[in-house]
Amino acid sequence: MKKLLTAVVLVAGTMLTGCAGSTPQTPSATPKLSVEESCKFLNTDTFVPSGSAKEQAGQIGQHYQEVADKVAPEVGAPIQQMADIMKQVAASPTGTKTDAQTAQLTEQINKIGQYCK
C-alpha cells in the first residue's frame, strides 16, 4: 500500500505538471475517463511543481482540481478533496501541510487505492 501511496502522490504531482499549461475546459464539455483509464492516467502523470512551498502547494491544488475534473467520479471525488486540502495549505502562511492535513491526504489516497490496485 505504501508503494501505491507513493505512486499516487507521484502521479498526482505529475498530473499537475501535465495540466499546468492547458486551457481550462468546462467539466461538462469533456467526458470523464473510465475508472481503468483514470488509474492509467494517474500512473503516468509526471507533474512537478516549482517555486516556494506556498507556490508548490497552490500548483498541486490546481493540478488536483484539473485531474479531478477529468477522471472517473469514483477516483475524482478523493482527488477533489485533495485539491481542497492543498488549496488550504497554499493559503497558509508557510505553505506547509499540518499533520492533520497529511492524514487527510493519506486517507484520500487510500480511497483512490481502492479503485486503482
Image (spheres, helix red, strand yellow):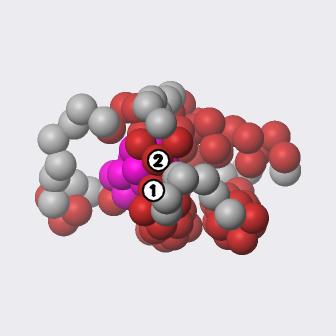
In the displayed structure, would residue 17 be above or below residue 56? above
As drawn, the label of residue 111 is none
111 relative to 1 in the view: left or right? left
**In this orientation, which residue lies closer to the viewer: 83 or 73?**
83
Tag 2, which secondary structure? helix
- x, y percent for residue 77: 49, 70
Identity of the amino acid at label 1? Ala
Residue 19 position in % (x across, y down) = 32, 38
- Which residue carries the number 2 mark? 54
**Residue drawn at the location 63% of the way across and 58% of the way down:** 97
* Residue 116 on image: x %, y %: 66, 52
Kindly identify which residue carries mark 1.
Answer: 90
Query: Quick check: marks 1 and 2 in contact, CB under 8 Å?
Result: yes
Query: Can the viewer see residue 66 in this picture?
Result: yes
Any part of residue 115 in sight: no
- Label 1 and label 2: CA atoms lie apart by 5 Å
Q: Residue at x 18, y 65 (%)?
A: 28
- Check residue 76 for magenta coloring: no
Determine the image quadrant of residue 21.
Answer: top left
Residue 107 % position (x, y): 72, 68
| 58 displayed left or right of 114 | left
Exactly how many numbered labels are in the figure? 2
Residue found 15% across the figure and 41% down from its top: 23
> Residue type at mark 2?
Lys
The residues colored magenta run: 56-66
